[in-house]
Amino acid sequence: MTLRHGREYLAIPGPTNVPDAVLNAMHRPAVEIYTGPLLEITSSCLEDLKRLFATTTGRSYIYAANGHGAWEAALTNTLSRGDKVLVLGSGRFATLWGDMAAFVGIEVEELSFGFRNAVDPAAVEARLKADRAGEIKAVLMVQVDTASSVMNDVAAVGRAIQAAGHGALFMVDAIASLATMPFEMDAWGVDVAVTGSQKGLMCPPGLGFNAAGPRARAAHQRAGLRTAYWDWTKRDGAQHYEKYCGTPPEHLLFGLRQAIDLLFEEGLEAVFERHRLLAEATRRAVAVWGEGGALDLNIVAPSARSNSVTSVRTEGIDPQVLRDYCSEVCGVMLGEGIGELSGKGLRIAHMGHVSGAMMLGTLGSIETALGALDIPHSKGGVQAAVDFLAGAVSAAPAEAGLRNAGA
């Protein structure tokens, strides 16, 4: 017996669910790339990306690439072979960014904080103070690691770099955090920010982005790893095709324009609050289930748990069996554990185009699976999520609607 007939729901941390409005915006013929409406779409997207990154001093760049391409663009535009970077490990993806740096000839030192903890700003400050020769040219960090589900305090690390009096560039991966929680590039001292289209931006995979501040653009002038495709200077050219080093990814741009419009229509503060509430509801449910002994939230400190994705450790059970039940019976696809949680956990995403109905349905599917599979757990996780949302979300709009209907 299966209950999955209907629209499958992706509760994985990328690609995320694409709104129908974005899909519809992409469903149109190709247009001419040298004149006409595509020029305005490019211009407006570049400006609005700066707004999403919260920078007035930085410049934004769009690549036909995934987030790994955006990583490479950040590295090659600012660094030279033999330069040293400090990678702040708190899961899987900062380490992978460091691996990419090593591949192109950059020396990499990793300061690891494990798979269950956030980056410690004090340790970053101490390491940079010890680098009296200024060998470290950049600090690489993710705001949210989708493997561990940690949320790192970008502002605090930025302050630590400043307190150390160190000249290293501060590069931040906001791939799994932009448009799900605050990101303040200028205020937090971020020199290069990167993101991708397939998470909080609610678009299909295929677009990567850089935002480069003044210090990064100064470093760019002497960078020895620059290549034609990723090069910021070439993409600052006057011709439209130069913004993309060739033919623009038109239909992805049509979708991006619509997705950004949806975010601004909702309002960024409301977007952030929606993600916070649905994330906390998910954590409340997992905490209750975990009282049975088989499940546990991966990130130890509550303040370091992200509002994009929740990683869950499993004890004594095969998480794939749970994932298969949710997919095959309920039509809900959960994320598999990766990195340290490979075969030992799962991930529940709550980012991008996600609503209360979507998340409560996902949590209900998980609790159904736990019961059907006789996995040890405490019942009432969904009720804990419902109780939290009922207490957190004002009933005033609904009451106003009822009054208006009565009038």
Image: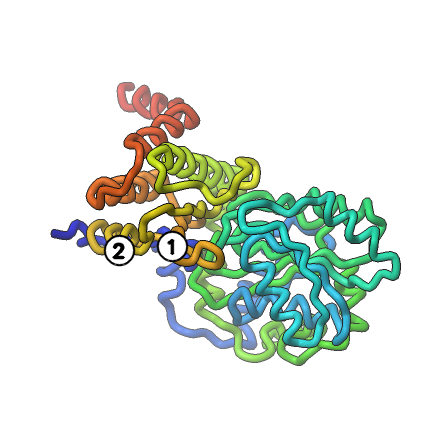
> What's the image's color scheme?
rainbow
Q: Amino acid at mark 2?
A: Asp
Residue at 42% from the left image edge and 58% from the top image edge = 342
Question: First in sequence: mark 2 or mark 1?
Answer: 2
Instruction: Residue 311 in the image: state x and y as whole percent.
Output: 44, 47
Q: 44 or 366: which is nearer to us?
A: 366
Residue picked out by circle 2:
324
- Picture layout, residue 256 above or below residue 274: below
Residue at 61% from the left image edge and 68% from the top image edge = 99
Instruction: Residue 24 in the image: state x and y as whole percent.
Output: 35, 60
Quarter location, residue 375 = top left
Q: Is residue 178 visible?
A: no
Quarter location, residue 58 = bottom right
* 342 to the left or right of 110: left
Instruction: Residue 316 in the image: state x and y as whole percent.
Output: 34, 47
For this orientation, the residue located farthest to the left is 1
Residue at 58% from the left image edge and 54% from the top image edge = 174
- Picture layout, residue 388 above or below residue 357: above
Residue at 42% from the left image edge and 63% from the top image edge = 204
Q: Specify few, some or many for label 1: CA neighbours under 10 Å numbering under 14, 14-19, or 20 or more.
A: many
* 323 to the left or right of 126: left
* 2 to the left or right of 110: left
Mark number, residue 335: 1
- In three-dimensional space, the C-alpha distance between marks 2 and 1, rounded to whole angstroms, equals 11 Å
Q: Secondary structure at mark 1?
A: strand
Instruction: Residue 244 in the image: state x and y as whole percent.
Output: 58, 74
Q: Amino acid at mark 1?
A: Gly
Q: 253 or 304: which is nearer to us?
A: 304
